[in-house]
Image (cartoon, rainbow, N blue to C red):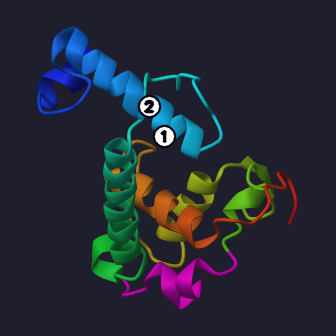
């Protein structure tokens, strides 16, 4: 939190007691609007500005995932195959069912394991590490496309 406050001196969270009082008042207003009157969020008071920043940053991440998903070169394919050739708009990727047993791999896998299987096999590319920005963006895009779908781990 201290680092965030140093990076965002204009924020209502900065500015000593006066800033803290403004942040608490804003948080109460937001909390009431969200049905959480007076309760603190895990990371402190959450403002409308915070929510807007988080939504914008998430959207940028998802857009980058879409670019990778739809671009064979960005994916690292050596045969010109992109994810959307088999999964238009992330259809049939079912992130909400992972982890699950996957016959192609003969074991229980996570979504990222299946993404790597597709990169290595149909796309003939090089697998991505779990913390690779491309992997994280791909996962974000796939999850965003399936948002609102109930989680049913292990289902095929």
Quarter of the C terminus within the rendering? bottom right
**Is residue 104 in view?**
yes
Looking at the image, is 102 positioned above or below residue 42? below
Point out which mark residue 27 bears.
2
The percent coordinates of residue 63 (x first, y second) are 35, 70
The percent coordinates of residue 78 (x first, y second) are 34, 79
Q: Quadrant of residue 21?
A: top left
Which residues make up the magenta segment?
Answer: 76-92
Side of 74 where 9 appears, left or right: left
Q: Residues within 10 Å of mark 1 (few under 14, many from 20)?
A: some
Q: What residue did someone put label 1 on?
A: 30
Q: Quadrant of residue 58?
A: bottom left
Whether pointer 1 and pointer 2 mark residues with C-beta atoms closer than 8 Å, the reply is yes
Side of 4 where 119 appears, left or right: right
Look at the numbered disc 1 and give the secondary structure of its residue.
helix
Side of 146 where 33 appears, left or right: left
The percent coordinates of residue 31 (x first, y second) are 54, 36
Q: Is residue 41 shown in magenta?
A: no
């Amino acid at each position: 939190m201290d680092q965030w406050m140093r990076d965002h001196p204009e924020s209502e969270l900065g500015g000593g007691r006066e800033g803290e009082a403004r942040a608490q008042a804003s948080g109460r207003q937001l909390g009431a609007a969200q049905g959480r009157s007076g309760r603190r969020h895990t990371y402190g008071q959450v403002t409308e500005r915070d929510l807007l920043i988080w939504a914008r940053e998430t959207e940028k991440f998802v857009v980058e995932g879409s670019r990778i998903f739809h671009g064979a070169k960005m994916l690292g394919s050596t045969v010109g195959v992109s994810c959307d050739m088999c999964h238009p708009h992330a259809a049939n990727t079912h992130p909400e069912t992972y982890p699950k047993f996957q016959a192609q791999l003969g074991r229980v896998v996570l979504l990222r394991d299946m993404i790597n299987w597709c990169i290595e096999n149909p796309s003939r590319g090089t697998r991505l590490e779990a913390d690779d920005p491309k992997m994280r963006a791909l996962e974000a895009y796939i999850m965003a496309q399936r948002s609102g779908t109930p989680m049913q781990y292990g289902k095929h």
